[in-house]
Amino acid sequence: MDLRAAGVDPALASVFPVSAGVGRDGRLALAGVDCRALAERFGTPLYVFDTATLRAQARAFRDEFAARYPAVRVAYAAKATIGRWLARLLDAEGLGFDVVSGGELAAVLAGGVSPKKVHFHGNNKLPAELEEALDAGVDCVVVDNFYELELLDGLARRRGARQDVLLRVAPGIDPHTHAHTTTGTLDSKFGFPIATSAAEEAVRRAMVAPGLRLRGIHAHLGSPIFETEPYRLAIEVMLDFAARMQERYRMPLEEFSPGGGFAIQYVREQPAPPPAEYAGVICGTLRRGCERHGLPLPRLLIEPGRATVGRAGVALYRVGARKEVPGVRTFVSVDGGMADNIRPAIYGSRYEAVSADRPLAPAEETVTVAGRYCESGDVLIRDIPLPRLDPGELLAVPAAGAYCMAMSSNYNWAPRPAVVLVEDGRAQLVRRRETYDDLLRCEVD
C-alpha cells in the first residue's frame, strides 16, 4: 500500500521515493522490499535507491523540456552522486553527463557511457584531468578561467586537435540559496564575470585559439534553486551578452546552458517546482530572447543532478543511545551521521525522518537526531517530532540520494556505507560496505 493510501501525510509522502509504501507487517517498504529486511541483509547505515524514481525523474526532465524546445540535451550532473550502476541506468534513459573531475569521468566511462555524451566542468581542472578528457574524446569542455583556456589550447594543439568548448560566464544573478552553493554571482570562484571585461576577453581569446572551437556559453547559478525567476533573469543577461559578442567577434551560439541547480523537496513545508515549471520558464525565456536579439535558437543544455537522484534515495540508520537534557533537548543517536551526510553540518540542511519499523506511529516527542561521530556539529535532524524510538529501531531519512554518498568521508576511520538499488520487490547491491582492510589498503609501511 502506498504511503498516502496508508494514511501518511501527503506532504511527507511526497518526500519519499514514488515506490515507497507500507507492507502488510506495517513496516516501511521501498519498491516492495521491506526496509527491515534490507537492514538485516546489508547492514546500516544503508543507502537505498529506487529505480522507478530515478527513471521517472530522468524522463520528466527529458520530456518536459523536449515538449517546449526543439533541441535539448539533458546532462546528469554527476557530482550529485555517481557510480557505474547509475551511469548505466541514466545512459539507458538517454541522458548525457556533466562531470567535474577525472574520477567522475572514469566512473561514467566505466559505466559504458560514450565520451561524446560527456562534458567536463570545474574551476581548476588539473592538467592531468584535461589530458584524460582529451584522451577519452569528451564532447565538450566548459572553460572556467584564463589559465584553463590557455592550458587546454596548448594541450589540444600539441595533439593536433581542436577541442569544442563552452565558456562559463557569471551573469551576476543571486539565486537566493545558501551562500556556499551560490555560484553565478560576481563574488564567486566560478566563471568569467559578464559585469567586468573578463567574459568578453575570454570570448576574444577563445575565438582565435587554434586548439579550441567555441560553441557557446554556459552559466550555473547555484543549488538548490526553489524559484524560477533567477533562471529568467540569468538567461536575459546571457543573451544580451551573446548578442554583443556575436556582433563584435562573430561568436557562435550553437549551444546555450543556464546550468542546473533544480531543487527537490526535503521537508514537508517546502515543495519544489516540478520539472515542467522550470522547463516553461527556461524554454520560454530562451525563445523570446533569441527572437528579440535576432539569434537562431541554440541547442539547450540543462544539468539536473540533485533533481534526478535526490528523491530516489533513502538512508536507513539503526537507533542507539539516548540522552535526555531536561528543559533543553533529547538526543537520539544513530549509527551514521556526518561521515555519510555532511550536508546538515555545513549547509544547515533539513530532513524528514520516520521509523522504518513503525511509519504510521504518531509522534510522541520532539528529539534531535544525532550522529555517532566525535563532533558536536554531527547532528542529522534538529527538533523533529517522532515516536519514542527504541535502541535497534530503524530510522528512515528520505531525500538522501544527492550529495550524501558523494560527499561522504572516512571521518573517525568509519567505513562508508553500502548502496542498494531496489526495483519490483528485488534488491541489488551496487556498492559494498567498506571494510577496515579497505581503509588500510593505501597505507605504506
Image (cartoon, rainbow, N blue to C red):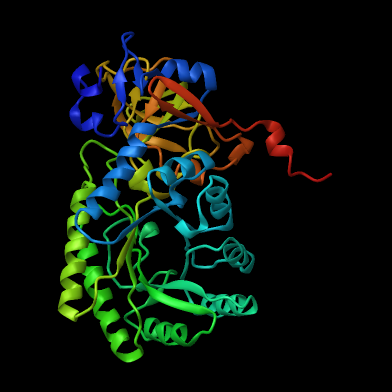
Q: Is residue 201 above or below residue 225?
A: below
Q: Is residue 153 above or below residue 58?
A: below
User: Would residue 266 be found to the left or right of residue 434 on screen?
Assistant: left
User: Would residue 179 be found to the left or right of residue 407 on screen?
Assistant: left
Residue furthest right as drawn: 445
Quarter of the image holding residue 393?
A: top left
Q: Residue at x 28, y 54 (%)?
A: 225
Q: Is residue 78 above or below residue 134?
A: above
User: Would residue 340 be found to the left or right of residue 355 on screen?
Assistant: right
Number of marks present in the image shown? 0
The image shows residue 271 at horizontal and vertical percentages of 21, 42
Quarter of the image holding residue 134?
A: bottom right
User: Would residue 367 be found to the left or right of residue 103 on screen?
Assistant: left
Q: Residue at x 28, y 86 (%)?
A: 244
Q: Residue at x 48, y 59 (%)?
A: 116
Quarter of the image holding residue 242?
A: bottom left
Q: Is residue 444 visible?
A: yes
Q: Is residue 227 visible?
A: no
Judging depth in this view, the residue of 99 and 216 nearest the camera is: 216
Judging depth in this view, the residue of 72 and 34 nearest the camera is: 72
Judging depth in this view, the residue of 232 and 64 nearest the camera is: 64
Give the position of the C terminus as an image quadrant: top right
Q: Residue at x 22, y 55 (%)?
A: 279
Q: Is residue 199 above or below residue 125?
A: below
The image shows residue 429 at horizontal and vertical percentages of 53, 28
The image shows residue 416 at horizontal and vertical percentages of 57, 35
Residue furthest bottom as drawn: 248
Give the position of the N terminus as an image quadrant: top left
The image shows residue 59 at horizontal and vertical percentages of 30, 44
